[in-house]
Image (spheres, grey):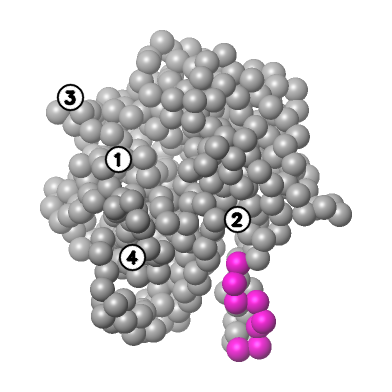
């Protein structure tokens, strides 16, 4: 997107009324992973260079200063820990576990998962402390989900038939999916300590349990499965069950399906978003549910914006629903690009308990944390 100086000036003036907070940070290399490691820190890692930084960043303390923001000296992101990864990072997950401070990463064309230590010590260096060797490489990198038990473990896979649960300390395989499907995995997530959901690139959902190798699947209509699909799962971790979950599926054509696991045969809502797909790839598509704002869904990865929707306003079959908020900041804060590649938001995440606070990153290396003003209820 080509942005004139007048457009940038206009957006800046508008942003003074649109945002409660807006902080901008510039990474040396762009990231497609933002993972919470505590309520005030995130981990990011690069994907565009043979050797990439992996960083744990402390969010601007001004976000947490309340009425004393004017007295807060820290108004920028701060690097807490840092290190280097010997491959582009395609997926990164913070691992749950008792007294655990680590993340696991996967890379493109890699036959391993790497384990990184984030524990506090006298050093500010993020160190690789383990490697899980895999039987096959993955052109897109393996998708990862953290196990929800005290003993650290990861559920991971590149195709449905190679999804398995691995114990981090021993490298022992605790569980393997008993299915021969070659469908590529676009995402996976635990519902509780045992149940999990996998989304395939063709939109098929697979539901499994680590106590049983059998797995159920729910395919889309044949007319829909020609697109690339990703998913977002709305849960109440860690006590969730499938009956209480809502799943959203987003296609590379901008179609969104909301489904209830109690009746997967027909979507609860089905909408067609009015998206300008300025980026030629679907690598950065993201759809996530707000953890602290009921029924709100966010979408990015098509251009330089993040769109936030209130799904209660959606009818059963709707075209071009209006977003409740659009973050366009990356289009106006980006560094000049000389290769002609359009800017795209590479990922975004919601804050775990601040209702309207999100973090987003873009292909120019910019990273924003922003909290938009709710004009209907300024108390939130």
Query: How many angstroms separate mark 1 from mark 2 (CA)?
Result: 26 Å
Q: Nearer the viewer, residue 264 or 86?
A: 86
Q: Which of the two discs, 4 and 2, labels the residue nearer the N terminus? A: 2
The disc label shown at residue 331, or none: 4
Residue sitting at 39 percent across and 84 percent down?
Answer: 16
Instruction: For marks 3 and 4, give the CA distance.
Output: 36 Å
Q: Nearer the viewer, mark 2 or mark 3?
A: 2
Residue at the disc numbered 3: 222
State which tag comes first along the sequence, 2 or 3.
Answer: 2
Q: Are marks 3 and 1 in contact (CB under 8 Å)?
A: no
Q: Between marks 2 and 3, how big is the CA–CA gap?
A: 39 Å
Mark 1 surroundings: few (<14), some (14-19) or many (≥20) residues within 10 A? few
Q: Nearer the viewer, mark 1 or mark 2?
A: 1
Question: How far across and down, in percent of the image, does residue 73 sit?
Answer: 67, 82
Q: Which residue is mark 1?
A: 281
User: Are circles 3 and 4 on residues that touch, CB within 8 Å?
Assistant: no
The residue under label 2 is 42
Distance from Cα at disc 4 to Cα at disc 2:
23 Å
Earlier residue among tags 3 and 4:
3
The secondary structure type at the circle numbered 2 is: strand
Tell me if 212 is positioned left or right of 1 in this view.
right
Disc 3 or disc 1, which is closer to the eye? 1
* 357 is higher (above) or lower (below) than 102: below
The magenta stretch is 70-77
Q: Is residue 283 magenta?
A: no
**What element does badge 4 sit on?**
helix
Residue drawn 75% across the image and 28% down it: 169
Q: Secondary structure at mark 3?
A: loop
């Amino acid at each position: 997107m080509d942005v004139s100086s007048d457009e940038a000036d206009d957006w800046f003036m508008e942003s003074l009324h649109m945002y409660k907070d807006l902080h901008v940070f510039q990474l040396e290399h762009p990231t497609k992973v933002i993972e919470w490691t505590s309520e005030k820190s995130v981990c990011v890692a690069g994907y565009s260079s043979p050797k990439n930084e992996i960083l744990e960043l402390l969010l601007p303390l001004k976000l947490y200063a309340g009425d004393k923001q004017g007295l807060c000296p820290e108004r920028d992101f701060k690097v807490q820990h840092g290190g280097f990864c010997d491959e582009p990072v395609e997926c990164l997950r913070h691992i749950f576990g008792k007294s655990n401070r680590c993340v696991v990463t996967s890379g493109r064309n890699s036959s391993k998962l790497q384990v990184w230590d984030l524990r506090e010590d006298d050093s500010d260096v993020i160190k690789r402390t383990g490697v899980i060797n895999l039987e096959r490489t993955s052109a897109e990198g393996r998708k990862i989900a953290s196990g929800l038990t005290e003993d650290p473990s990861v559920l991971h896979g590149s195709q449905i038939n190679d999804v398995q649960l691995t114990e981090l300390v021993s490298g022992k395989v605790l569980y393997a999916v008993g299915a021969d499907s070659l469908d590529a995995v676009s995402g996976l997530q635990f519902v509780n300590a045992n149940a999990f959901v996998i989304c395939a690139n063709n939109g098929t959902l697979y539901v499994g349990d680590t106590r049983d190798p059998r797995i159920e699947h729910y395919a889309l209509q044949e007319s829909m499965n020609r697109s690339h699909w990703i998913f977002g799962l709305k849960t109440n971790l860690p006590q969730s069950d499938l009956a209480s979950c809502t799943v959203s599926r987003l296609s590379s054509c901008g179609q969104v399906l909301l489904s209830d696991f109690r009746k997967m045969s027909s979507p609860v809502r089905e909408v067609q978003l009015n998206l300008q797909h300025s980026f030629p790839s679907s690598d950065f598509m993201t759809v996530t549910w707000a953890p602290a704002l009921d029924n709100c869904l966010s979408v990015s990865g098509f251009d330089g914006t993040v769109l936030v929707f209130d799904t209660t306003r959606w009818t059963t079959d709707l075209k071009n629903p209006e977003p409740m908020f659009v973050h366009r900041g990356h289009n106006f804060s980006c560094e000049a690009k000389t290769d002609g590649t359009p800017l795209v938001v590479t990922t975004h995440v919601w804050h775990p308990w601040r209702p309207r606070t999100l973090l987003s990153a873009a292909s120019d290396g910019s990273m924003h944390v922003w909290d938009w003003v709710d004009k209907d209820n300024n108390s939130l």
